Image (cartoon, rainbow, N blue to C red):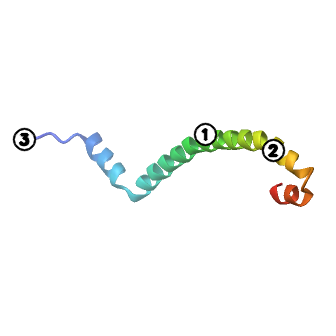
Amino acid sequence: MENSDPLDTAEQAYVQHPQNNLVKARRLLLDVVQALHAQVEALVVIGAQAIYERLGTYQSMASTSPRLMRILL
């Protein structure tokens, strides 16, 4: 005869409960968003550096074309 461990039964009931699955999915999604947030911050820094490097070129064009400078900035 097989012994049924009450903890195994309780754990299975916990895992199968829809609300618990929703909580797990929410936590997983929050972890993913947090990981992506770091990537977005890095992208913003890289983008800002690229714009800063190009800004000198835009400013030199602005002296000959103020309208172009207004469009670019």
- Give the Cα separation between the discs numbered 3 and 2: 83 Å
- Circle 3 sits on which residue? 1
Task: Give the amino acid type for the residue marked by disc 2 in the picture.
Answer: Thr
Nearest to the observer: residue 54 or residue 39: 54
Eyeballing the image, is 15 above or below 18? above
Q: Is residue 4 left or right of residue 33?
A: left
Q: Is mark 2 on a helix, strand or loop?
A: helix
Nearest to the observer: residue 18 or residue 67: 67
- Find residue 70 and report its horizontal and vertical position in percent: 87, 58
Q: What element carries label 1?
A: helix
For residue 11, what is the image quadrant?
top left
Eyeballing the image, is 45 above or below 72? above
Which label was assigned to residue 38?
1
- Circle 2 sits on which residue? 57
Q: Earlier in the sequence, mark 1 or mark 3?
A: 3
- Find residue 35 and report its horizontal and vertical position in percent: 55, 41
Sort mark 1 into few (<14), some (14-19) or many (20+) by Cα contacts within 10 Å.
few
Quadrant where the N terminus sits is: top left
